[in-house]
Amino acid sequence: MLLCRRKIYRTLSRFLVFLTFCLLFVQIHLSSRTKQVMKPAILSWFSWQDLQEFERKNMKNNTLDNNSTMNININKKNKDNSLVHGLSLRVNGGLQSKQNEILEVKNSLLGSSSLPLLSEELPYYTRHIINPSLLCAPDDFMIAYIHAAPENSKRRMAIRQTWGDKKVLGKLKIKLLFVMGVVNNRHVMDMVKVESARYNDILQTEFNDTYRNLNSKAMAALRWIATNCQNISYIMKTDDDILVDIFQVVKYLRYLQLYKYAREKFILCNVWDLMLIIRNKKSKWYVSPEEYPNKTYEVYCSGSAYILSSDMPVRLLKISLKIPRFWVDDVYVTGMLVNALGIKHTYYNSAYTFIVSDSLDEILKDNKRKTAIYHIPHTETMYKLWNILNERMNHSGATRNILK
């Protein structure tokens, strides 16, 4: 009898333990289900406006963090603070919306190109030895940048006293910039600093200024313009042995603008088509088959002078990330890059003359003034020619018509 009772108690206790485990399992399972069900119920206590406000606060905090990070990146990459002007994203700037501020920075960089590219993402950054405090105003018509060698101070002075005269360019709302690299001659480098302090029109960047490095000069100039002169209408590139009839160039561009042409995706130049590649090793223009295997270059512009719409620097810099570099700068920039963008060159060949004699007889015969770009190797001839062109403009009253 006693044995039976013990068996019964043992069986009951086991059953109670089993029942306890079952109850615990059910409670845990119901608890997790209750949490899942309760989530929507809890969220329903908050209004949709509260949720939006919560998200806005999170977004604002993220924006502030991004702004601080962007400031650090810009300051690290630009010891000369060339990109800080107009791009600084200060946390305590007093603007109502940091998101709007970011959009304004992007838009100021892009100009009319609508390409999503921030300044620190632009390629070809090199440290500036000399960075001018040159400011491009929103109403400026054009910036003319000139490939110059550091030692060619006489040519730069000739340009400043002829077609690059600040009084002339000021009336036409044009800025002037000389772009160069560095040389090993200490005296030349010191004289460039003195020249820059006086005229504030020199951009000197940290690359060796050699013929084979002209590509670096071209891309450094485009990068500087893309970050400092995005609101202007046009960019003109020339060399320091070129005289530009700036009156005629501005007149022609404004004529194109009148018909809503040449606003974007625009390049105007003396177009070279099917130009043979020089294989003579004694020539400074020698290009080996390994560098460029074809017999002729693709369509490109004469590097003596060409004109771009304001969106082109950013477009060229962006596409350059995909196109391998080639040392002949005009072939690379105005040929390989422009063609990769699918942009057609606008012919301006009739405005160029590449041989100007010291007598200037041919210029005097050009009464219709078709020529606007002159290649002049001697500075004395540049002064003579400019006197003729400037006198014609003053006598005809054409300057007043252009400025209208």
Image (cartoon, rainbow, N blue to C red):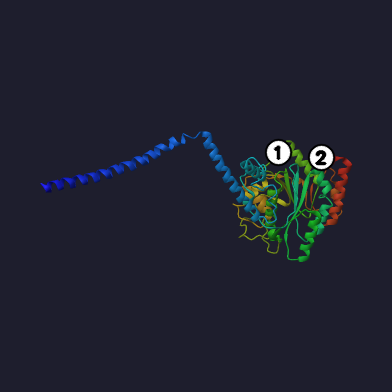
- Decide: few, some or many residues near mark 2? Use Cα within 10 Å; few <14, some 14-19, many ≥20: few
Residue 311 x, y percent position in the rendering: 67, 44
* Residue positioned 79% across, 56% down in the render: 197
Residue 378 x, y percent position in the rendering: 82, 57
Residue 136 relative to residue 33: left or right: right
Residue 241 x, y percent position in the rendering: 78, 55
- The residue tagged 2 is 403
- Decide: few, some or many residues near mark 1? Use Cα within 10 Å; few <14, some 14-19, many ≥20: few
Residue 226 relative to residue 26: left or right: right
* Residue positioned 84% across, 49% down in the render: 363
Q: Is residue 183 above or below residue 349?
A: below
Residue 393 relative to residue 5: left or right: right
CA distance separating discs 1 and 2: 19 Å
Instruction: Return the residue found at the far front.
Output: 2
Residue type at mark 2 is Leu
Picture quarter containing residue 381? bottom right
Residue type at mark 1 is Tyr
Q: Secondary structure at mark 1?
A: loop
Residue 7 relative to residue 164: left or right: left
- The residue tagged 1 is 261
Residue 397 x, y percent position in the rendering: 87, 40
Name the quarter where the C terminus is drawn.
top right
* Circle number at residue 358: none
* Mark 1 or 2: the one toward you: 2
Instruction: Return the residue found at the far right.
Output: 395
Asked whether 128 or 60 is in front, the reply is 60
Q: Secondary structure at mark 2?
A: helix
